Image: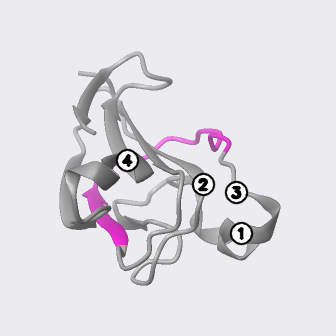
């Protein structure tokens, strides 16, 4: 198991009536890391403060939400969050809410990936 969890949220269309997600995490200790880059179209910059980031040293718990949550998420967003812990520590994640699409036909509109490791080197836990 890697000491890093990589969280990615991607949309290709607005959420309509779909609220996105809320994810909570808990760690025992934290190291300083660089924030991974995220992307929002120019007309969706109002969500910039909600799209991506990295945990801070000493931050033991937290919450990650999709841009716009609990309202609908924006179109064409790619948001990355990085949660990093010391090698012998583990991250506990509880997905408190997930509403990305109503039907299987709409599944390609948005996805949430939780990856054990950084830059897709680890195992995808949920997509």
In the figure, is residue 38 to the left or right of 58? right
Circle 2 — which element? loop
Between discs 2 and 4, the one toward the N terminus: 2
* Residue 33 x %, y %: 59, 39
Residue at image x 82%, y 62%? 42
Q: Earlier in the sequence, mark 4 or mark 3?
A: 3
Q: How crowded is mark 4: few (under 14 residues within 10 Å), some or many (20 or more)?
A: some
Residue 56, image x, y percentages: 53, 55
Question: Of marks 4 and 1, which one's residue comes earlier in the chain?
Answer: 1
Q: Which of 90 and 115 is in front in this view?
A: 115
What colouring style does the render use?
Answer: one colour
Query: How far apart are the two marked residues, 2 and 4, measured between alpha carbons?
Result: 11 Å
Q: Quadrant of the C terminus?
A: top left
Above or below residue 61? Residue 88 is above
Give how far apart the Cα atoms at labels 4 and 3 are.
Answer: 15 Å
Q: Residues within 10 Å of mark 1 (few under 14, many from 20)?
A: some
When the figure is inspected, residue 20 is found, relative to residue 56, above or below; the finding is below
Q: Name the residue under label 4.
A: 111
Q: Helix, strand or loop at disc 3? A: loop
Answer above or below: position of 117 versus 16.
above
Gap in Å between the C-alphas at discs 4 and 1?
A: 18 Å
The answer to which image quadrant residue 100 occupies is bottom left
């Amino acid at each position: 198991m890697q000491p890093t969890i990589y969280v990615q949220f991607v949309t290709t269309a607005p959420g309509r009536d779909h609220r996105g997600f809320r994810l909570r995490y808990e760690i025992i200790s934290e190291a300083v890391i660089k924030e991974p880059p995220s992307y929002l179209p120019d007309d969706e910059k109002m969500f910039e403060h909600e799209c991506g980031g990295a945990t801070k040293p000493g931050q033991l718990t937290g919450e990650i939400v999709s841009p716009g949550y609990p309202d609908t998420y924006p179109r064409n967003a790619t948001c990355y969050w990085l949660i990093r812990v010391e090698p012998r520590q583990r991250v506990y994640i509880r997905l408190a809410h997930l509403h990305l699409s109503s039907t299987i036909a709409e599944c390609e509109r948005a996805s949430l990936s939780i990856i054990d490791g950084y830059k897709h080197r680890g195992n995808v836990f949920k997509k």
